[in-house]
């Protein structure tokens, strides 16, 4: 049976990854685009207009004033760890064929081993 190598996903290099997710806002923008691919929609009333809340990764509905975060409903919800670290951790966990231990992840990210363990 012939294998179809054209349809295989090729992960980016670490340099490409770091260029794409250079700052926190890049990560938040990525999550926003994945969460609302057709534009923001209020989960409570369905309105399409919102305002970003300064200093937070949240948006407030212009109609009902409901506030929602780009990380709500994900493993990143209410995290205090920067999104860049989460994205790097996910990158390392998904690109290493053998997997990565919490000790190895803590060394790669420069964070305590206990935090790396809780991220896995």
Image (spheres, helix red, strand yellow):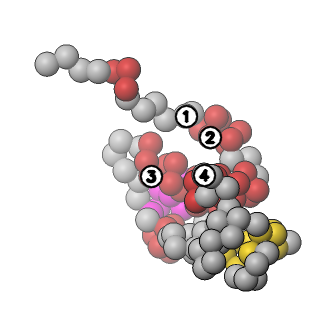
Rounded to the nearest angstrom, the CA distance separating label 4 from label 3 is 26 Å
Rounded to the nearest angstrom, the CA distance separating label 2 from label 1 is 6 Å
Q: Say above or below: 12 vs 72.
A: above
Rounded to the nearest angstrom, the CA distance separating label 4 from label 1 is 22 Å
Instruction: Report which residue position mark 1 lands on.
Output: 12
Name the side, left or right, on which 9 lies relative to 76: left
Secondary structure predominantly adopted by residues drawn in magenta = helix
Instruction: Report which residue position mark 3 lands on.
Output: 93
Q: Which mark is residue 90?
A: none
| Comes first in the chain, label 2 or label 1 | 1
Q: Say above or below: 105 vs 94.
A: below
- Dot 2 alpha-carbon crowd within 10 angstroms: few under 14, some 14 to 19, many 20 or more: some
Instruction: Using the image as rendered, state which of residue 118 and residue 56 is in the foreground.
Output: 56
Rounded to the nearest angstrom, the CA distance separating label 2 from label 4 is 21 Å
Closest to the camera, between mark 4 and mark 3, is: 4
- Dot 3 alpha-carbon crowd within 10 angstroms: few under 14, some 14 to 19, many 20 or more: some
Instruction: Report which residue position mark 4 lands on.
Output: 37
| Comes first in the chain, label 3 or label 2 | 2
Q: Position of residue 108 (x, y in %)?
A: 57, 53
Q: Position of residue 73 (x, y in %)?
A: 52, 73
Residue 53 is drawn in which quadrant?
A: bottom right
Residue 24 is drawn in which quadrant?
A: bottom right
| Element type where label 2 sits in the image | helix
Closest to the camera, between mark 4 and mark 1, is: 4
Instruction: Report which residue position mark 2 lands on.
Output: 17
């Amino acid at each position: 049976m012939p294998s179809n190598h054209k349809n295989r996903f090729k992960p980016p290099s670490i340099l490409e990854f770091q260029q794409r997710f250079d700052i926190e806002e890049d990560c938040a923008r990525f999550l926003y685009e994945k969460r609302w691919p057709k534009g923001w929609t209020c989960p409570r009333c369905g309105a399409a207009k919102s305002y970003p809340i300064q200093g937070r990764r949240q948006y407030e509905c212009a109609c009902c004033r409901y506030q929602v975060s780009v990380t709500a409903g994900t493993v990143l919800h209410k995290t205090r760890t920067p999104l860049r670290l989460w994205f790097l951790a996910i990158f390392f966990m998904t690109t290493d064929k053998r997997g990565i231990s919490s000790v190895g992840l803590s060394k790669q990210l420069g964070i305590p081993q206990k935090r790396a363990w809780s991220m896995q």
